[in-house]
Amino acid sequence: MSVTRGDWLVVVTDKPTPLLSAALTAAQRDASPPRVLVSDGSGWDWLSEAIGRLTRMELRLVLVFDTRSLLGACLANKAPAIRAAAVVTLDDARRALQDMGANFLLTDQRGKTWFELRQLLRICAEASPHCPDKVAKMLGELERHAHR
């Protein structure tokens, strides 16, 4: 696994489609280009690495392209300070970033157009995730009542 550039991270767990490769290449020319980590998809090592970098505040946001986005979001949400959301559409991504201050987005690259991929990368480049007070309060209450 190799990581390059930026204060936000894109993780690709499967071989990138040509459209995703082109969108990532274009994103490297942006004002806030992402670091890119390409994993072989055989395990969950990328998840631990991404969560670790986010919790150590080396990153402000992680965007993951994985076919197991729902499971990945569930696992990521077990870590403190992670607000993960599995998203399908651009609107899902915008809402997750705004409404819950998501700092960990997961989606599937398959079936997305170059425009959708590029816009998703732009949305993430411009995002500054902040957990809204009401959400933070609810998360705190849930944490106090958690049965571990």
Image: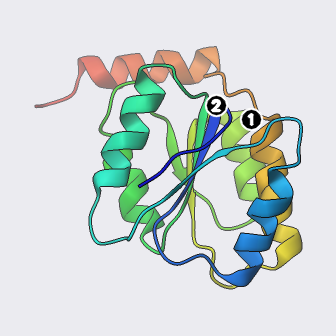
Split into 4 quadrants, where in the image is the N terminus? bottom left
Answer with left or right where residue 94 lies relative to residue 17: right
Disc 1 marks which amino acid? Gln
- Residue at the spot of label 2: 101
- Residue 90 seen in render: no
Residue depicted at 61% across the width and 28% down the height: 60
User: Can you give x and y, in whole percent of width and height, for residue 67 in the image?
Assistant: 47, 75
> Is residue 130 shown left or right of residue 19?
left
Residue type, mark 2 in image: Gly
Residue in front for this viewpoint, 17 or 139: 17
State the colouring used for the structure image: rainbow
Q: Quadrant of the C terminus?
A: top left
Marks 2,1: beta carbons within 8 A: yes
SS under mark 2: loop
Residue 21 in the image: above or below residue 131? below
Rendered location of residue 89, percent (x, y):
74, 66
Near mark 2 (Cα within 10 A), the count class, few <14, some 14-19 or many ≥20, is: many
**How far apart are labels 2 and 1 at the CA level?**
5 Å
Which residue was labeled with disc 1?
A: 98
